[in-house]
Image: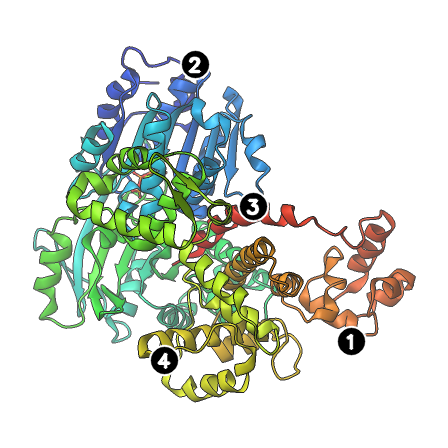
């Protein structure tokens, strides 16, 4: 029996979606939101975790969809994009066409025109705006999920810029912002001209508390005890959640602050837990464990081992596929205990009946034990007790000693989440978005730039006097460095400026690269080029640890005449430079350029640089993106290094020495198989063409199926790819960044 009443003005067919999802009744904050949605008002919904915020956005989308209006749903992370995409796709029976876009290719823009809802990451949305995709003007609903991330120094500025742009570009579209509970949601609503909906309703009761010894202190100062089995509080609290749950379905999610502790704690638990699980469970777990393949890295061996005993870890060092396996195993209720870094916290629905936050501090440059903000702890807490999975939830933070209990109660159990503060004032963000405003013709003179800046949350929260000094200073930088030309009436981007904006790099990176391209060293090697890109602010450096310092320094001086950027004398700059050399050394290993060796395997990279497969992929993607930017700038300036840069870029993309370049163009052949083919004597595409399937099949790692595929694709003329036009490669570049940010921890 459907009991849901819709307000006047709401399209009646919205009910059909509730039927499909099996929604019987709206939660109170959802009810509160229906009226404003029907009236077409903008909304900022700041309510607790699991209160069903997505449904509010979905209703707004459907209300317009049934009147032929199109929507954009912006989320911070890929994983979240997939979840929203799947939920909306369940409505295909209603005719709703949903697209998921993290944008690997630019030509997806065109495709997107034909969908009713586009789910995109914020960086993708930014890149769509930069390309001025026409359909954006026709949007009727724009959703910004996890809008409290305006506060995040990494992701906040881009989110803020897209919201500001949409407000200007598309003032009639309905803006729905979803946020965690924060201190100043009415301020955000004020900025966006939105109505604010707040509430402390949560559909599944969450019992929050502080753990110490074998006891939990709850919000109302009530206490519960759990069994001491191991003498270790965390392990006992986890085991209790799994073994002593009422229905035997308990699962526990633990948040820790480093990858290493995620791994060690998971392995430790796996050992203990396996002794308590039945044979049926264990054999299921073994098969999940066996399905985690494709890597020799130690971290993956550890993962398989942990999973076999019913525990797992989840962090950015794992590749996407591995993370998905872990999430699926946990959702299927096979993996009982999951140890994660906070990457997992935002927005996701998981069957964790109990969440334990082991670490409430984290390393920050100025404070190695900086307390994690309340807002973020509440996000982690909020993964427990999700309506689809559980009837109750428990969220605990661990006190290391009895004296900490009071402090943690005050701060995290009774305390209020912080206010969200704009981070657009940070220089890299501001200079990048100022340049792109001119380069993409969103603004043409200082008045229009000011109109834009005044429309930001940054300006809403800050003194205009302070902002005007910052903006003037950055204008000076952009003009002096040749990105912009400033006349009495108007400001325009130079070719250099336009190119840099399209390449989606920090203008300061472009300055570093330009200086390097002007140098004339004794010789230009892959190291020359890689050191330059690693010296730009777009590539996060690998810091040099004390014991590595000599090794890196020696390498740097031994290759001094290859350097395009002089070694700085000032200490802080020198440290940064040394890090860029270390990062370049990692990429050299990756492309088999160090000490005459072949391409380093995942295990070697892991032991030399402490990077897991997921890190390697992130770093490689970033490097390729900046290398292509460097190549483009080299063409622009006619530097003579273009073809060398091009070659290095291709090699980094595939992780190979030069001789393997032709082989990796074959379908199904990556760096490892290419090396094996090469070592087995198949040194060119031509030799492979002449070989029999049976011969190829004998090469280790190839096998019959792949051998057939290689031969077939060659016959079909798909063989080695045609040479790609350079422009096409550039087009790939902007949106690739969306992937990078998706992985950032
Ligand atoms: N009215 C409802 N009745 C039953 N289940 C609902 C209802 N509304 C939402 N849900 C379910 O509740 C779960 C949580 O919803 P959702 O993911 O939207 O939460 P959220 O408020 O966005 O939380 P978070 O802050 O963690 O992102 C989902 O599984 C959703 O299907
Ligand atoms: Mg959500």
x 14%, y 53%: residue: 413
What is the secondary structure assignment of the residue under circle 4?
loop
Task: Verify CB contact (< 8 Å) between mark 4 and mark 3.
Answer: no
Residue 558: quarter of image? bottom right
Viewer-proximal residue among 360 and 686 = 686
Viewer-proximal residue among 613 and 48 = 613
Callout 3: 10 Å neighbours few (<14), some, many (20+)? some
Residue ID for mark 4: 569
Of the numbered discs 2 and 4, the one sitting upstream in the chain is 2
Give the Cα separation between the discs numbered 3 and 1: 33 Å
Quadrant into which the C terminus falls: bottom left
Callout 4: 10 Å neighbours few (<14), some, many (20+)? few
Residue 364: quarter of image? bottom left
Foreground: disc 1 or disc 4: 4
Q: Tell me the number on the disc at residue 104.
A: 3
Residue ID for mark 1: 679
Taking the image as four quarters, which one is ligand 2 found in? top left
Callout 2: 10 Å neighbours few (<14), some, many (20+)? few
Give the Cα separation between the discs numbered 3 and 2: 31 Å
Residue ID for mark 2: 67
Residue 523 placement (x, y as % from top left):
62, 77
């Amino acid at each position: 029996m459907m009991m849901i009443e819709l307000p006047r003005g709401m399209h009646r067919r919205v009910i059909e979606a509730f039927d499909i999802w099996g929604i019987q009744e709206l939660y109170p904050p959802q009810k509160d939101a229906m009226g404003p949605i029907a009236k077409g008002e903008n909304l900022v919904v700041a309510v607790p975790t699991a209160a069903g915020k997505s449904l509010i956005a979905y209703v707004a989308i459907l209300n317009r969809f049934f009147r032929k209006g199109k929507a954009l749903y912006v989320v911070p992370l890929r994983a979240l994009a997939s979840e929203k995409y799947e939920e909306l796709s369940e409505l295909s029976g209603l005719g709703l066409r949903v697209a998921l876009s993290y944008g690997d290719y630019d030509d997806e823009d065109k495709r997107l025109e034909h969908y009713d809802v586009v789910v995109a990451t914020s960086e993708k949305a930014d890149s769509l705006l930069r390309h001025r995709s026409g359909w954006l003007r026709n949007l009727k609903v724009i959703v910004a999920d996890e809008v409290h991330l305006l506060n995040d120094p990494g992701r906040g500025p881009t989110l803020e810029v897209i919201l500001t742009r949409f407000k200007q570009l598309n003032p009639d579209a309905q803006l729905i912002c979803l946020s965690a509970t924060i201190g100043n949601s009415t301020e955000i609503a004020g900025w966006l001209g939105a109505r604010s909906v707040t509430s402390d309703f949560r559909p599944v009761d969450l019992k929050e508390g502080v753990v110490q010894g074998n006891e939990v202190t709850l919000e109302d100062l009530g206490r519960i005890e759990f069994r001491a089995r191991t003498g270790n509080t965390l392990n006992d609290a986890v085991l209790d959640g799994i073994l002593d749950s009422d229905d035997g379905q308990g699962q526990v999610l633990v948040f820790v602050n480093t990858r290493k502790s995620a791994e060690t704690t998971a392995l430790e638990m796996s050992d203990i837990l396996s002794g308590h699980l039945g044979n049926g469970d264990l054999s299921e777990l073994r098969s999940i464990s066996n399905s985690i393949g494709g890597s020799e890295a130690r971290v993956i061996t550890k993962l398989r081992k942990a999973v076999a005993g019913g525990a797992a870890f989840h962090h950015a060092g794992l590749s996407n596929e591995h993370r998905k396996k872990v999430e699926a195993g946990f959702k299927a209720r096979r993996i009982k205990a999951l140890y994660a870094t906070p990457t997992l916290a935002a927005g996701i629905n998981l069957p964790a009946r109990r969440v334990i936050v082991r670490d409430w501090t984290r390393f920050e440059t100025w404070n190695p034990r900086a307390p994690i903000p309340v807002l973020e702890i509440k996000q982690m807490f909020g993964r427990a007790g999700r309506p689809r999975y559980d009837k109750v939830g428990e969220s605990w933070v661990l006190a290391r000693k009895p004296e900490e209990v009071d402090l943690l109660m005050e701060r995290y159990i009774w305390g209020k989440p912080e206010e969200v503060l704009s981070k657009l004032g940070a220089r890299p963000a501001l200079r990048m978005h100022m340049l792109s405003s001119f380069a993409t013709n969103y603004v043409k003179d200082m008045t229009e730039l000011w109109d834009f800046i005044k429309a930001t949350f940054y300006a809403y929260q800050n003194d205009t006097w302070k902002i005007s000094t910052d903006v003037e200073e950055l204008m000076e930088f952009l003009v002096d460095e040749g990105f912009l030309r400033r006349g009495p009436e108007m400001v325009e981007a130079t070719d250099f400026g336009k190119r840099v904006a399209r390449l989606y790099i920090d203008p300061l990176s472009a300055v570093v690269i330009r200086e390097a391209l002007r140098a004339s060293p004794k010789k230009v090697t892959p190291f020359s080029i890689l050191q330059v890109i690693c010296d730009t602010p777009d590539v996060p450096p690998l810091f040099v640890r004390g014991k590595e310092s000599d090794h890196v320094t020696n390498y740097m001086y031994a290759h001094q005449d290859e350097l395009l950027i002089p070694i700085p004398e000032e200490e802080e700059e020198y440290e940064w430079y040394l890090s860029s050399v270390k990062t370049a050394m990692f990429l050299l290993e990756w492309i088999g350029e160090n000490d005459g060796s072949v391409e380093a395997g995942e295990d070697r990279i892991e032991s030399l640089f402490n990077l897991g497969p997921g890190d390697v992929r992130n770093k490689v993607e970033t490097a390729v993106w900046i290398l292509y930017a460097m190549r483009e700038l080299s063409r622009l300036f006619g530097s003579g290094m273009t073809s060398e840069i091009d070659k290095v870029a291709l090699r980094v993309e595939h992780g190979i020495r030069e001789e393997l370049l032709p082989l990796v163009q074959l379908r199904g052949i990556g760096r490892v198989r290419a090396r094996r083919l090469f070592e087995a004597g198949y040194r060119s595409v031509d030799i492979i063409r002449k070989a029999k399937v049976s011969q190829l099949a004998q090469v280790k790692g190839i096998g019959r199926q792949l051998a057939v595929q290689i031969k077939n694709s060659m016959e079909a003329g798909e063989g080695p790819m045609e040479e790609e036009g350079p422009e096409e490669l550039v087009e790939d570049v902007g949106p690739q960044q969306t992937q990078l940010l998706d992985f950032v921890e």
